[in-house]
Amino acid sequence: MAIRKSKPAVRPLYREMFRDALILAWQEKKLWFFAIFALLLQSGGLLDVLLTAVVRFPEDARLLMQQQGTGLGSAVIAHLSGLTGFQAFMGYATLAQGLLLFGIILAAVYGMSVVSQGALAYGLGTRMRGAVPSFRACLGAGARKFWPLAGINALSMLVFWAVRVVTLIAFQLAAETPTAFAIGVFTVAFICFLLAAALVTTVHLFAINRVMLNEEHAWPALLASYKMTVQSLGIVLEHAALLFLFAFTANILGIIVFLMALVPLFIGMISAALFQFGTLVLIGIFLGYALLIGIMSVIAMATTTFQYASWQRLAWRVEDASAMTKVVRIVRRLLGHRA
């Protein structure tokens, strides 16, 4: 009699989740438009957070700890303080006009990013449920949920920047007095910063999915998402680390593609330089920058869409209690269990 093989006790997690997310991100290219705006506030990964921290930490820490302001803002204030009468009035009026214009542009970008996050979550979730949402339906769904989504974004930014400020202070203290204790404090603070970034990202995206797909209000969605994140902390951290590796690999591949595409352009620029065609060289430089921006923009849109889709799949797997960390799976295999 043939022996039937028993099915695994636990379904594969990342294999299914990442496969489905990749297929969905590739099939729903119309959602890439929303992804390019959504990533301005929340990309769904940790690569941009880590890169920003590494690049900006020294300068941000110095500006945070110094007593006197520097830069363009201080120069403008110093210039205005030296004016009197009508000149001072016109100077402050021009400054107010510039600040108002900057505020309008900033609010428009923030609003578009908020709406795009909702549209992207709605489109991916609807497609996962078997329907095919239109671009207009996704945009409308994101716009209708603007205020709950704006509240979630504001709270996420507040928590993230609070942790970031503490980490910046620890970094500056370690830079000014590089003792073993100060360096240890900064190391701990930086690890906490990365963990906080992963947790904020998880709660943020889980809450957006609940608002867009389950019609929940912002605060109940945040509380439920926080509870679900804490209960599945190991899976969340594993998932965040894997998404970091995926985004890093995607960006490396994008750079490789750019360098390969740059070869014929570079040869053409050298030929133009040898024949002293300066205009063609400038055109070649412009095309090179345009090529780089184009390739990396496509990588960013596709990666963001994939990351949003993978977080949705993870939320569903956590909710139906069919998710298990890779570490636990390995231990179960070592103990002789089917994983």
Image: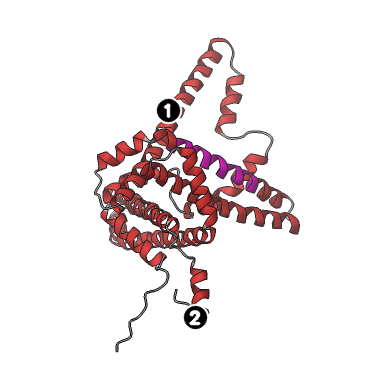
Say which quarter of the image contains residue 187. Answer: bottom right
Residue at the location (46% across, 24% down)? Answer: 100
Quadrant in which the C terminus appears: bottom left
| Residue extent of the magenta highlight | 149-168
Three-letter amino acid code of the residue under disc 2: Gly
Towards the viewer: 49 or 57: 49
As helix, strand or loop, the secondary structure at mark 2 comes to loop
Label 2 sits on residue: 336
Towards the viewer: 166 or 204: 204
Label 1, residues with CA under 10 Å away: few <14, some 14-19, many ≥20: few
Towards the viewer: 239 or 160: 239
Label 1 sits on residue: 104
Across and down, in percent, residue 156 comes to 52, 42
Quadrant in which the N terminus appears: bottom left
Say which quarter of the image contains residue 255. Answer: bottom left
CB-based contact (under 8 Å), mark 2 and mark 1 = no
Towards the viewer: 188 or 6: 6
- Kindly tell me whether residue 239 is visible in this rendering: yes
The secondary structure that most of the magenta stretch takes on is helix
Residue 308 is labelled as none
